[in-house]
Amino acid sequence: MEETLGEQIKRRRGKALTQRQLADLVGISKSMVSQIEQDKKTPSIPVLQRIARALDVDMRDLLGTRSSLPSADPDAGIVAIRRALTPVDDLVDGSEEDLHVSLSDARRTVDRAWGAYSFGRFEVLAGLLPSGIAQVRATAHAAQGNEVAPAHEHLARINWVAGCALVHFGQPDLASIAIRHALSAAEKGNDELLMAALRGSVSWQLLVSGRYEEAHAVALKAAASVEPRGEVSEQKLAVHGALLLQGATAAGRGQRVHEALALAQEAGTVAGRVGRDTKWYESDFGPSQQVMQTVDINISNERFVEALTVAKAMPNRGIALTPVAQGRHLVDKAAAAVQLGQYQLALDMLLTAERVVGKEWVRYQTLLRTVVGVLLQHDRRNALREFAQRVGVSV
């Protein structure tokens, strides 16, 4: 018989922690821990995140929602991406020289990868990345003269998208390798904004891993490196604003809500200077993104009413956001709704996210699947059960 959430927590706590010790680590009462372990109380999403961190487990394992990426193609999937990111050709007298392509072809490969990521087509991306990484790396190694910098910037961008995708695939260590490769490649380029944006991605990876202080520090240092002074380009404003929002989100996850909201407000001032929703350096920034991240901050601090109130300020219902960002915002709102007992509203938002972004994307979203797991504690109707099965949550 499958374990309940409470049984999972109790088993994993085991003899290592008492209920009091777990309560102190999570910041809740001992009686609440007892109620959760007896399945008499469902923890909020932020509390569940802190429980998982205290127990040193991935929240997807705690809820039984971890996803894999099986493929009949030996040149696609996690194993193939790992092989592409960690080649040993130099140790076995091999070479990738015959794989190199023109700069324009390398750019098209990188753009296709980011397009697949932006539209949530993760299985397509998993098939494209292994060969794409090898080709773009070979192109960078073969580049000479004035082609060296742009070739390495392409290499940085394809490693970057690999790192982003690997986070969703539940491979944080491999994602860290990818983003480090991206940073090394970008150092051979000439684009300071690319370097800053990549550091923002490092911050995001740290955030996902629960390293909030470090995520905050990395984001704000990167933001300071491209602080706009006087009249500057829209690109620089957007990258700076996005980094401020990343720092705000990290502060929010670290339960420093006032600092987080102040940073989000500062980012809102930058968004006002930009004057519209933009996408530069693979990142959304503008009024819509500022609202989206402010909602996230409120949810992280269990301010669910405030989160849904802020969400009402989203310009044009978020249509300026990429499909993936729209889906993420819907999932955030569903996370707030489920904590307020608005179960049908939460499910409706999740189903809308599935329609907006697609069935591939929803299977790799930890928060979405976590919300589904919480919903199943309260609702066992067919619509929810069918959705749970589609996203890989045990029913």
Image: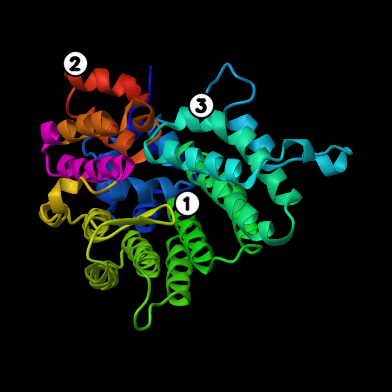
Residue 122 in which image quadrant: top left
Q: Name which residue type carries label 1.
A: Ser
* Label 2 or label 1, whichever comes before in sequence order: 1
Residue plotted at (23% across, 73% down) = 269
Tell me residue 12's x, y (percent): 45, 38
**What is the CA distance from the residue labelled 2 to the residue labelled 1?**
34 Å
Kindly indicate whether the residue at mark 1 contacts the one at mark 3 (C-beta within 8 angstroms). no
Identify the secondary structure beneath mark 1.
Answer: loop
Label for residue 382?
Answer: 2
- Left or right position of 122 against 33: right
**What is the CA distance from the residue labelled 3 to the residue labelled 1?**
20 Å
Q: Name which residue type carries label 2.
A: Asn
Q: Nearer the viewer, residue 2 or 333?
A: 333
* Label 3 or label 1, whichever comes before in sequence order: 3
- Left or right position of 248 against 343: right
Label for residue 209?
Answer: 1
Residue plotted at (27% across, 36% down) = 371
Residue of label 3: 69
Residue plotted at (55% across, 32% down) = 128
Residue plotted at (47% across, 73% down) = 221
Tell me residue 94's x, y (percent): 85, 37
The part of the chain drawn in magenta is 322-345
**What is the CA distance from the residue labelled 3 to the residue labelled 2?**
26 Å
Kindly tell me whether residue 43 is visible in this rendering. no
Kindly indicate whether the residue at mark 1 contacts the one at mark 2 (C-beta within 8 angstroms). no
